[in-house]
Amino acid sequence: MITTTETGVTLEVNGERHDLRLDNRCTLLDVLREELGLTGAKKGCNHGQCGACTVLLDGRRVNSCLVLAVTADGSAVTTVEGLATAGGLHPVQQAFLDHDAFQCGFCTPGQLCSAVGLLAEARADGEVLEESAVRERMSGNICRCGAYPHIVRAILETAG
Ligand code: FES
Ligand code: FES
């Protein structure tokens, strides 16, 4: 007989507090999509290989398909739905629009969250980003449409 255990988990998602009771086996991605209805983060591979599920966990980018939600208890999560503010789109979102940095859009929420995390990492390290560094640091986010040159341009423009 299979038994499951539930745990009380508190998450702050895009600035809103959620008190949840979750099966210990739930991933953060499934909680975001299925419990909270935030379907921006995508389930591509579900194995940590495509980056479509990328969100920010306490400001750091993670593959949410690899994070057990119970381990994120007490954390702040930002999904693509939380990037824009009342003042408008996040600068990275605007740059993606300006540079046509997507085609089908499936990978785009993950690319955006990853780019926001990358820019924060570079700022913290005092690093001036160059194209090769952006490509390397975004290598965990796969785009089957091959929009990479536009994505890199958008990120470099925002970094500048
Ligand atoms: S769905 Fe998480 S890395 Fe692919
Ligand atoms: S825009 Fe289609 S997978 Fe990236």
Image (tube, rainbow, N blue to C red):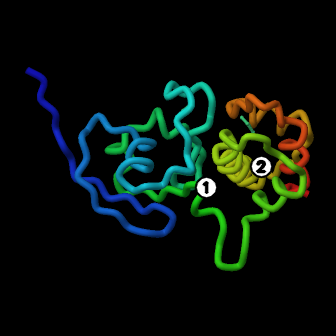
- Tell me how many marks there are: 2
Quarter-of-image position of residue 108:
top right
Residue ID at (89%, 57%): 98
Residue ID at (71%, 44%): 105
Give the x, y percent position of residue 115.
Answer: 73, 48
Q: Amino acid at mark 2?
A: Ala
Q: Is mark 2 within 8 Å of ligand 1?
A: no
Q: Is mark 1 within 8 Å of ligand 2?
A: no
Dot 2 or dot 1, earlier in sequence: 1
Report the quarter where the C terminus lies. bottom right
Q: Which mark is residue 122?
A: 2
Q: Are marks 2 and 1 in contact (CB under 8 Å)?
A: no
Which type of secondary structure does the marked residue at label 2 adopt?
A: helix
Cα–Cα span, label 2 and label 1: 20 Å
Quarter-of-image position of residue 91:
bottom right
Which type of secondary structure does the marked residue at label 1 adopt?
A: helix
Query: Crowding near pointer 1: few (<14 within 10 Å), some, many (20+)?
Result: many
Q: Quadrant of ligand 2?
A: top right
Left or right: where 154 falls relative to 52: right
Give the x, y percent position of residue 118.
Answer: 72, 47
Q: Which mark is residue 80?
A: 1
Report the quarter where the N terminus lies. top left
Q: Which mark is residue 147?
A: none
**Residue furthest out toward the left:** 1
Image vertical order of residue 31 relative to residue 3, above or below = below
Between 126 and 141, the one nearer to me in the picture: 141
**Residue furthest out toward the top:** 1
Q: Amino acid at mark 1?
A: Val
Give the x, y percent position of residue 19.
Answer: 28, 62
Residue ID at (28%, 53%): 9
Left or right: where 19 falls relative to 126: left
